[in-house]
Image (tube, rainbow, N blue to C red):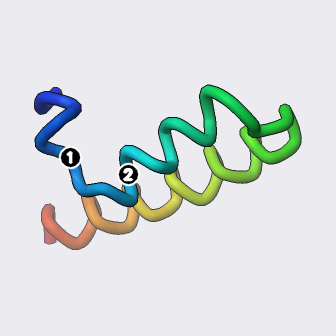
Amino acid sequence: MSDFHSLPKTIKKTIRYLHQDASVDKLVEIQKMINDVIQKRLAEKQS
C-alpha cells in the first residue's frame, strides 16, 4: 500500500472520519460503497 502522506486529501479525511467519528452503521454503509466501486473499477480494468 502506498504511503499515507501520498494519498489524496479527501482519502485522508475519510480515513480520519472512520477512525474518529463514524458509527458502526456508517462504517458498514461506507464499506459497501467502497467495495462496490473497487469491484467495478477492477472489472473495467480486466476487460
Q: Vertical placement of 47 versus 28: above or below?
A: below
On residue 11, the disc is: 2
- Left or right, 31 with reference to 22: left
Residue at image x 62%, y 36%? 18
Residue at image x 24%, y 56%? 8
Q: Quadrant of residue 28?
A: top right
Residue 23 pos. (x, y %) = 85, 36
- Left or right, 40 with reference to 13: left
Residue contact between numbered discs 2 and 1, judged by CB atoms under 8 Å: yes
Looking at the picture, which amino acid does disc 2 mark? Ile
For marks 2 and 1, give the CA distance: 6 Å
Front-lying residue, 31 or 19? 19
Q: Which residue is mark 1?
A: 7
Task: Give the quadrant of the C terminus.
Answer: bottom left
Residue 17 pos. (x, y %) = 61, 41
Looking at the picture, which amino acid does disc 1 mark? Leu
